[in-house]
């Protein structure tokens, strides 16, 4: 398959969107009309996926919500094609034959996913099996570098004796793993998860450390991430960032910690939120050029 | 359910074994006679599980090998009872509702697993949902602190500006999360994964930092971990360590990178290896008293 970064950037170009729709189907948040269905979560995700065609460049099913039905996120990834690429949000991290098993399962030739999120805590040898399968199969890997949650500060933000921060050390490894795996677009198949909650200057520093990585930047919307931070990761052509959003885009009626039920016109609300979000990032991309 | 640590220590007492049988059923390593069966991996694991009854205190299915059949590791955990406790080796790590979903799935009331391995890279708020469900349901959590692979050095071993190492910072969090969750045995439901490959003095330091944690110590056998390191984590009563072993115990004919096929008497070979390993650790436990 063609290089992952090239395929992703082509999708962004075609749709004019850098938005990735996160599919985290919390059962208790689903619209009333779906809840009685035997496969309510799948139905909801399939509906959102259809609304996202042409309005986003990718989907990101959160595997935690599908542990009992591994075929469901795969069916979504298949249904998404060719309009939307798909990122399996798994945050897997393990070693040796275990990492190989995960890599084969989620990035191998038979997987419909285009990319996978992985956790770097176990070090380089835990990431290499994923990168190796991704290279062979034209897929991508997004390594957690600086996450969007409060607890990210506990270890990722610690200052090292060398003077750099732990997440900078992770960023250097990501850059190193991906530097020879760059597509025609100039971006590597090894990307980085960087919270949109990071201050703009931190994002700029990470972009300096990882010039070839596509940044997957969660935290925009519900978690308070800013478009200013996201803008600092874009290159001079408005490229290089994928913005995932789950709660804000797919449950807009639950914004700002609201506990509201889905309104009857929930499909319209999701479309409006997608259009609104795309407009924000179109403006940012324009001004980055 | 009764406190996880108390249940585990009772099993160790009853069996005289601190060994946990890792179930990582690599399809290409299975005995010839099983390979043609429709569910070869499950059959192999079920056979090993039966051999382990009375010869080990727990099993540890590696979920990576069961991504397509999530019911299989659960069936093994159910079949193991009451002879063997079960640890789901998942190394999950995520935040918010995602961590809650994983915790409910693998540690909740309907799960047959007694404990789960988790990854601390995302910090305290990513671990709390797991600890909270474990507390409610009498289960355990093993947090990766210092893993047994070579890549562990890349981030876990980095020296911080404060003078301590990253894995020591993780150890302090593990200790803090678990200090109020101690059972009658004196051990906490929050345990730690510490490679048996760590030098004895490092293990001693980690025991100092985490006096209440049960150490899950992989790397003995195939990865070159030593019983001297394991001995340093035992308390004065020979307690506090669970030794998982997968390849060395369940595929002894593949020891030392051999590519041998399983011999006809593979069951006998596994029993011998279990007995031999138990004898090693019985001696260590005796001398620690």
Image (spheres, coloured by chain):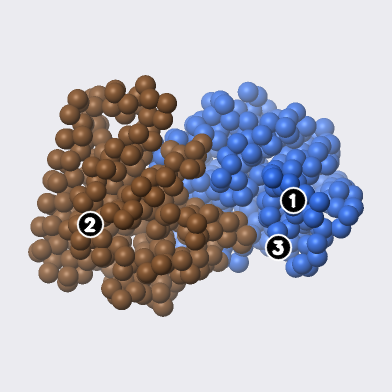
Chain colours: A brown, B blue
Residue B138: quarter of image: top right
Image position of A233 (left or right of A183): left
Mark 1 falls on what kind of element? loop
Q: Return the chain for callout 2.
A: A
Q: CA distance from mark 1 to mark 3?
A: 30 Å
Residue at (42% x, 63% y) in the render:
A139
Residue at (21% x, 31% y) in the render:
A266
Q: Are marks 1 and 2 in contact (CB under 8 Å)?
A: no
Q: Which mark is residue B262?
A: none
* A135 vs B112, nearest the viewer: A135
- Residue A288: x and y in percent read 13, 66
Counting residues from the start of the chain, the first of labels 1 and 3 encountered is 1
Residue A35: quarter of image: top left
- Residue B99: x and y in percent read 44, 39
Q: CA distance from mark 3 to mark 2?
A: 44 Å
Image position of A3 (left or right of B105): left
Mark 2 falls on what kind of element? loop
Vertical side of B63 occupied by A282: above or below: below
Residue at (47% x, 55% y) in the render:
A111
- Residue A150: x and y in percent read 34, 46
Q: Quadrant of the C terminus of chain B?
A: top right
Q: Return the chain for callout 1.
A: B
Task: Check disc 3: other Cα within 10 Å, few if <14, some if 14-19, many if 20+.
Answer: some
Q: Which mark is residue B223?
A: 3
Q: Can residue A66 be seen?
A: yes
Task: Check disc 2: other Cα within 10 Å, few if <14, some if 14-19, many if 20+.
Answer: many
Q: Can residue B114 be seen?
A: no
Q: Which residue is mark 2?
A: A18
Image position of B74 (left or right of B48): left
Task: Check disc 1: other Cα within 10 Å, few if <14, some if 14-19, many if 20+.
Answer: few
Residue at (54% x, 58% y) in the render:
A104
Vertical side of B89 occupied by A194: above or below: below
């Amino acid at each position: 398959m063609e290089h992952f970064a090239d395929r992703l950037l082509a999708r962004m170009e075609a749709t004019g969107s850098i938005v990735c729709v996160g599919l985290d189907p919390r059962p208790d948040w689903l619209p009333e009309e779906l809840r009685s269905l035997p496969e309510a979560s799948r139905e909801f995700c399939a509906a959102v996926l259809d609304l996202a065609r042409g309005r986003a460049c990718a989907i990101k099913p959160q595997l935690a919500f599908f542990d009992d039905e591994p075929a469901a996120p795969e069916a979504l990834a298949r249904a998404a094609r060719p309009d939307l690429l798909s990122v399996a949000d798994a945050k897997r991290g393990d070693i040796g034959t275990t990492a190989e098993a995960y890599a084969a399962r989620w990035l191998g030739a038979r997987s419909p996913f285009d990319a996978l999120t992985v956790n770097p805590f176990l070090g380089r040898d835990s990431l290499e099996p994923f990168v190796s399968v991704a290279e062979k199969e034209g897929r991508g890997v997004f390594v957690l570098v600086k996450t969007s949650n409060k607890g990210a500060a506990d270890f990722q933000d610690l200052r090292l004796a060398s003077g750099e921060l732990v997440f900078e050390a992770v960023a250097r490894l990501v850059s190193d793993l991906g530097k020879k795996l760059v597509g025609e677009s100039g971006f590597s198949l090894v990307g980085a998860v960087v919270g949109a909650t990071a201050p703009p200057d931190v994002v700029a520093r990470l972009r300096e450390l990882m010039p070839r990585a596509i940044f997957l930047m969660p935290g925009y919307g519900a978690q308070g991430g800013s478009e200013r931070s996201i803008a600092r990761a874009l290159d001079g052509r408005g490229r290089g960032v994928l913005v995932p959003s789950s709660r804000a885009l797919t449950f807009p009626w639950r914004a700002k910690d609201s506990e509201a039920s889905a309104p009857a016109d929930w499909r319209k609300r999701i479309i409006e939120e997608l259009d609104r979000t795309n407009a924000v990032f179109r403006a940012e991309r324009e001004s980055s050029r």
